């Protein structure tokens, strides 16, 4: 992987065979990133699993062959370590698009990602029992009103 920073922005190049989530998590730990937005991502992925939230659970779809990563967006928060939430748009060899919540993916050829970080901030991701999902909390340190 290569990484370069300009102010609070990072441009990353992930290389073939790297696990997308493990690599981003390791990068976030190494650079003490506890609040960030994955603004953009392109490249290719293999061993992909995507999900569609049906209101109570993710309906999972596994993609056997490599797909073009035509769009990647998400966030990095803190929940006992980096918590990475990503959505992806992927193009199959027949040029059909599929997308959703990215559950798993391995870099095929390369990925180019843009991260916007918020130094000095921590985003949280606590479970929201009413939704059954981990919900992004932009100010987890703030005390609830009395």
Image: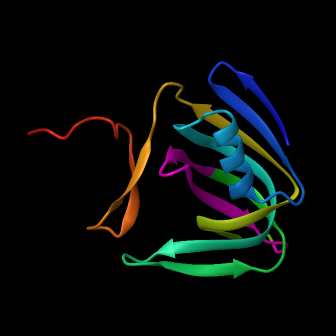
Q: In the figure, residue 91 lies in which quadrant? A: bottom right
Magenta highlight: main SS: strand
Instruction: Point out the image quarter for the C terminus.
Output: top left
Q: In the figure, residue 145 lies in which quadrant? A: top left
Please report the residue visible at 85 percent of the width from the left and 43 percent of the height from the top.
1
Between 125 and 85, the one nearer to me in the picture: 125
Please report the residue visible at 31 percent of the width from the left and 67 percent of the height from the top.
131
Please report the residue visible at 66 percent of the width from the left and 27 percent of the height from the top.
9
Residue 60 x %, y %: 58, 80
Task: Name the side, left or right, on which 132 lies relative to 91.
Answer: left
Count of numbered labels shown in the rendering: 0
The residue range painted magenta reads: 73-94
Q: Is residue 96 visible in the rendered structure shown here?
A: no
Q: Eyeballing the image, is 95 above or below 39? A: below
Q: Eyeballing the image, is 24 above or below 17? A: above
Snapshot colouring: rainbow
Residue at the extreme left: 146
Please report the residue visible at 68 percent of the width from the left and 67 percent of the height from the top.
104
Residue at the extreme top: 7
Residue 55 x %, y %: 37, 75
Residue 67 x %, y %: 80, 67
Between 79 and 40, the one nearer to me in the picture: 79
Q: Is residue 15 visible in the rendered structure shown here?
A: yes
Q: Does residue 85 show up magenta in the picture? A: yes
Task: Name the side, left or right, on which 96 lies relative to 129.
Answer: right
Q: Does residue 123 show up magenta in the picture? A: no
Residue 125 x %, y %: 42, 52
Q: Eyeballing the image, is 106 above or below 50? A: above
Between 142 and 102, the one nearer to me in the picture: 142
């Amino acid at each position: 992987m290569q990484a370069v920073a300009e102010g609070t922005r990072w441009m990353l190049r992930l290389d073939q065979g790297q696990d997308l989530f493990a690599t981003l998590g390791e990068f976030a730990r190494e650079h003490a990133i506890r609040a960030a937005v994955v603004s953009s991502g392109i490249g290719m992925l293999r061993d992909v699993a995507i999900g569609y939230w049906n209101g109570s659970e993710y309906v999972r779809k596994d993609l056997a062959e490599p797909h073009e990563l035509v769009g990647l967006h998400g966030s990095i928060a803190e929940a006992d370590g980096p918590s990475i939430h990503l959505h992806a748009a992927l193009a199959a060899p027949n040029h059909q698009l599929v997308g959703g919540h990215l559950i798993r993916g391995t870099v095929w050829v390369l990925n180019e990602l843009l991260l916007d970080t918020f130094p000095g901030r921590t985003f949280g991701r606590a479970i929201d029992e009413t939704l059954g999902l981990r919900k992004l909390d932009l100010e987890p340190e703030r005390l609830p009103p009395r």
